[in-house]
Image (cartoon, grey):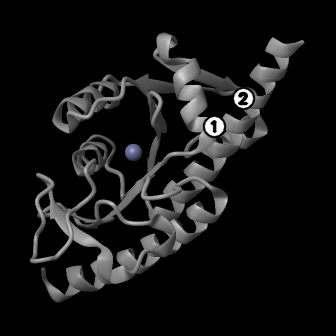
């Protein structure tokens, strides 16, 4: 890596470690769940990504790895990149994202299960939707696709490519029984999307549950 890319990598690693601490405190990445990445070079494509099996509340900047556009590690490192690295690469390529964040919250897990047969869920008419990039009114219907979970990551990545390149203006998707993926032009945009979506999932989950109970 050039000195400029290395400097961007070190900054991204430190910023992503901060995201890990904040998300852990919110209960969105308990245990070793979740993974985060940020683009540090577009040509050649290089991502700074979380290591596999790391506790996200106790990440150190030195834990992060640089990976290329095929998900291969670009320099010697004792750790391995996140198992879902290929999903990050697919999202970066399809959406020109600068950062990708993946969480395993209670609400995203429950809703991804509850709406699995619909292959997605709609959230509409909430003021908080305006926190999503390009949404300027509460009169908006956000469709969040649900992809079946799969331990075969290349197959899962190819399904994700399908939903991201079909022209739909999605900001995120869920993996059934698993969690949320969202992204942004910058890391701050991606972090805001997680906060907005987690809020909306909880509203959706609680109001759906109360209607069922009434
Ligand atoms: Zn996951």
Q: For the residue labelled by badge 1, is the local secondary structure a helix, a strand or a loop?
A: helix
Total labels drawn? 2
Q: Is residue 11 visible?
A: no
- Ligand 1 - quadrant of the structure image: top left
**Lateral position of residue 155 relative to residue 51, left or right:** left
11 vs 125: above or below: below
Q: Residue at x 11, y 64 (%)?
A: 44
* Residue found at the far right of this picture: 214
**Whole-percent x and y of residue 45?**
17, 60
Q: Residue at x 36, y 52 (%)?
A: 97
**Alpha carbon of mark 1 to alpha carbon of mark 2: how far?**
9 Å
Does the Cβ of the disc 1 residue fall within 8 Å of ligand 1? no
The quarter in which the N terminus is drawn is bottom left
Q: Residue at x 35, y 29 (%)?
A: 149
**Whole-percent x and y of residue 67?**
17, 63
Q: Are dots 1 and 2 in contact, CB under 8 Å?
A: yes
Q: Is residue 10 visible?
A: yes
Q: Look at mark 2 in the image and give the residue it sits on.
A: 204
Q: For the residue labelled by badge 2, is the local secondary structure a helix, a strand or a loop?
A: helix
Does the Cβ of the disc 2 residue fall within 8 Å of ligand 1? no
Q: Look at mark 1 in the image and give the residue it sits on.
A: 107
**Whole-percent x and y of residue 48?**
28, 68
**Lateral position of residue 1 relative to residue 109, left or right:** left
The quarter in which the C terminus is drawn is top right
Decide which of 164, 211 is in the foreground and name it: 211
- Picture quarter containing residue 24? bottom right
Q: Earlier in the sequence, mark 1 or mark 2?
A: 1
Q: Residues within 10 Å of mark 2 (few under 14, many from 20)?
A: some
Q: Residue at x 57, y 61 (%)?
A: 23
**Whole-percent x and y of residue 135?**
62, 39
Decide which of 191, 180 is in the foreground and name it: 180
């Amino acid at each position: 890596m050039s000195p400029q890319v290395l400097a961007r990598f070190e900054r991204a690693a430190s910023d992503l470690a901060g995201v890990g601490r904040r998300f852990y405190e919110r209960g969105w990445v308990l245990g070793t769940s979740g993974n985060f990445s940020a683009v540090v070079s577009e040509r050649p494509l290089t991502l700074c990504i979380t290591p596999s099996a790391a506790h996200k509340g106790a990440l150190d900047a030195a834990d992060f790895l640089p990976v290329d556009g095929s998900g291969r590690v670009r320099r010697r490192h004792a750790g391995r990149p996140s198992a879902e690295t290929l999903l990050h690469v697919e999202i970066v390529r399809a959406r020109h994202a600068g950062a990708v964040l993946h969480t395993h919250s209670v609400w995203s897990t429950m809703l991804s299960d509850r709406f699995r047969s619909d292959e997605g869920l709609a959230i509409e008419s909430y003021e908080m939707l305006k926190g999503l990039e390009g949404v300027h009114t509460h009169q908006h219907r956000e469709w969040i696709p649900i992809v079946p979970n799969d331990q075969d990551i290349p197959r899962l990545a190819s399904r994700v490519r399908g939903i991201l390149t079909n022209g739909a203006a999605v900001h995120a998707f869920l993996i059934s029984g698993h969690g949320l993926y969202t992204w942004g032009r910058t890391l701050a945009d991606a972090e805001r999307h997680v906060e907005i979506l987690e809020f909306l999932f909880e509203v959706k989950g609680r109001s759906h549950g109360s209607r069922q109970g009434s």
